Amino acid sequence: MDSAKPRPRQALSINGAIKVSLLDKILTTKRAEIVELERRILPEFPEVPPLEFLSGSAGDTLGLICEIKFRSPSAGPLSTTMTSEERARVYEESGASMISVLCDGQYFDGSYEELVRARQGTTLPLLAKEFIISHVQLRAARAYGASAALLIVRCLDDGQLKHLISTAEDLGLTPIVEVVTEVEAQRALDAGAKVVGVNARDLDTLEMDEARAHRVIEQLPAGTISLYFSGVKVPSDLEKVAESGAKGALIGETLMKQENPGPLLAQFRTAARRLQPTARGV
């Protein structure tokens, strides 16, 4: 199966003119990068920590997934005062459950090597956050120390999604499948996703819709582990996340704008300890 060829996508049209979305540009870059990645000699797979906060063995409070990224298309340049190693250490000391590391270079100033640097500063599980369209990217994520890898439904057709979920599991990675809409959520479930991250930000338009994200999470079936992505800015935002039934929340740009994210993350951790995800009915 050629998993490096993403599914055909409908072009955006504005006033009759075709507009290439940012996601399309990123995927074009990924296809070129995969050719180079296939030539890379990868390290042997290291031991990686499990995602305890997803299993419940770390308690029933809302998990906090804290992100390392040095730039984003929506926010521009972010703090580079701390290295990935230093920031990962502060995240763990301040109450993070997991650390998400951007691996895209052109648009987010990340790399697979940032996984290694983050691993040097933490014992927490790492999520390789990348625009994955090939098994080669999954192997790289595992080789550089990730416990989980992001698979974005909008980047893949149904066959590719199912194949990459299975491949990730075979490699010892937890596939976290990102969706935006109800339709994408159903595609994820049909492909075998067990952990679904619902993004409040539309990947094509970059517009935020928190109400839609909460609605998608609330409609996921019992037994599905759900995570809330994007838009968490202040500790009180975690209340609605927990009410939706999400097991964890990703906190990205809010922390990456901090030269020292420790004090703010500690506030998020205090708020999270008071919250339990709402159980969804069968």
Image: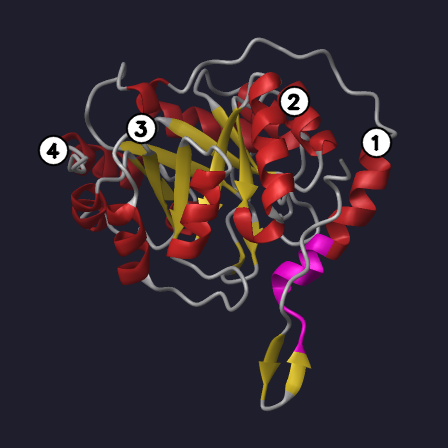
Mark 2, secondary structure of its residue:
loop
Q: CA distance from mark 3 to mark 4?
A: 16 Å
Labels 2 and 4: the sequence-earlier one: 2
Residue shown at 32% from the left, 19% from the top: 55
Q: Quadrant of residue 166?
A: top right
Image-based side of 44 in relation to 84, left or right: right
Looking at the image, do the residues carrying marks 1 and 2 touch, with CB atoms under 8 Å apart?
Answer: no
Q: Quadrant of residue 182?
A: bottom left
Mark 1, secondary structure of its residue:
loop
Tell me where residue 254 appears, x and y as whole percent.
37, 50
Single out the mark in the foreground, 3 or 2: 2
Whether residue 257 is visible:
no
Q: CA distance from mark 4 to mark 1?
A: 46 Å
Whether residue 33 is visible:
yes
Labels 3 and 1: the sequence-earlier one: 1
The disc labelled 2 sits on which kind of residue? Tyr
* Res 94 label: 3
Residue 23 highlighted magenta (yes or no):
yes
Q: CA distance from mark 3 to mark 2?
A: 24 Å
Identify the residue at the far top of this view: 47
Q: Quadrant of residue 77?
A: bottom right
* Res 274 label: 4
Choose between 111 and 148: the one closer to the eye: 148
Looking at the image, do the residues carrying marks 3 and 2 touch, with CB atoms under 8 Å apart?
Answer: no
Looking at the image, do the residues carrying marks 3 and 4 touch, with CB atoms under 8 Å apart?
Answer: no
Q: Main secondary structure of the magenta part?
A: helix
The disc labelled 4 sits on which kind of residue? Arg
* Res 126 label: none
* Res 144 label: 2
Single out the mark in the foreground, 3 or 1: 1
Specify start and end residues of the magenta stretch as a single range.
Answer: 19-27
Labels 1 and 2: the sequence-earlier one: 1
